[in-house]
Image: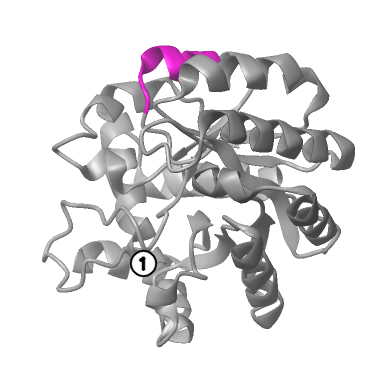
Amino acid sequence: MAVILRLFSESGMNMIDIGANLTHDSFDKDRAQVIADAQQVGVGAFIITGSDADCSQKARDLAHQYPDCCYATAGVHPHHAGDYDGEIEDLISGLLSDDKVVAVGETGLDYFRDFSPREAQVFSFERHIQMAVETQMPMFLHQRDAHKDFGPILKEHRDQLSRVVVHCFTDNEQALFDYLDMDCHIGITGWICDERRGTHLIDLVHNIPSDRLMIETDSPYLMPRNLKPKPKSRRNEPKYLPHIAEEVARIVGKPVEQLVAESTETSRQFFGL
């Protein structure tokens, strides 16, 4: 890992972590240091994920607190879709007019956990789609074990939407090809470093065009399991984004500098940074 960090530090590369849950309470005591540590290894920008009403407001506020490097999304994760109502929709809609908020979401469907009723998830997802259609802002989407419903809903509205990323992609070949056919971008996380459940991504990532591939940590979740030496903390951080980039570059057979340059430019264009 030390070699990887030195490479990015010395090269001056400015990567973009397109999915960092920096409002999470695990960062409350050292958030500034977490951002600084990531910047030291070449992560120059962070898209802070908004996953419910409160989190989206905090993400917006953090983006203003760190205006040189942070941006935010605003939305309601499917886990919280049961809380979605007109008041929350008005709040999210208002946040979307802020110049530091760059995407609608996180939104989508999650049938793996089913923390919210599926009917509520679909309703929330479709309302977010309507906001994205009205604003023509990019969409930041979540899908887990729900492609059978998620795919058709997205396809029905895809022509009305601008840019779409299915972030933290973990699904199968059919889902990937369906999203690519719909001109979606794909976010890859440290899941690809997980020998227990992410090995299928090793074959699939080859199919993602360079101008559709973006990388992210989804921190504090999804710590790359093959980090060496193994961190003492189980908290994932944006400073591990270079490791994910190196793994993806190795898998697809590209120099890591090329992979970083391509994914960074793709992310910059997607979010209009």
Q: Quadrant of residue 206?
A: top left
Q: Is residue 40 visible?
A: no
Q: Quadrant of the N terminus?
A: bottom left
Span shown in magenta: 171-178
Judging depth in this view, the residue of 128 and 210 nearest the camera is: 128
Q: Is residue 171 visible?
A: yes
| Residue 120 locus on image (x, y percent) | 60, 35
| Residue 106 locus on image (x, y percent) | 59, 47
Q: Left or right: 222 with respect to 238?
A: left
Q: Quadrant of the C terminus?
A: bottom right
Q: Is residue 148 above or below residue 95?
A: above
Q: Is residue 175 magenta?
A: yes
Q: Which residue is mark 1?
A: 237
| Residue 152 locus on image (x, y percent) | 61, 14
Q: Is residue 132 magenta?
A: no
Seen at 79% across and 61% down, the residue is 95
Q: Mark 1: few, some, or many residues within 10 Å (few <14, many ≥20)?
A: many
Colouring rule applied to residues: one colour
| Residue 171 locus on image (x, y percent) | 37, 25
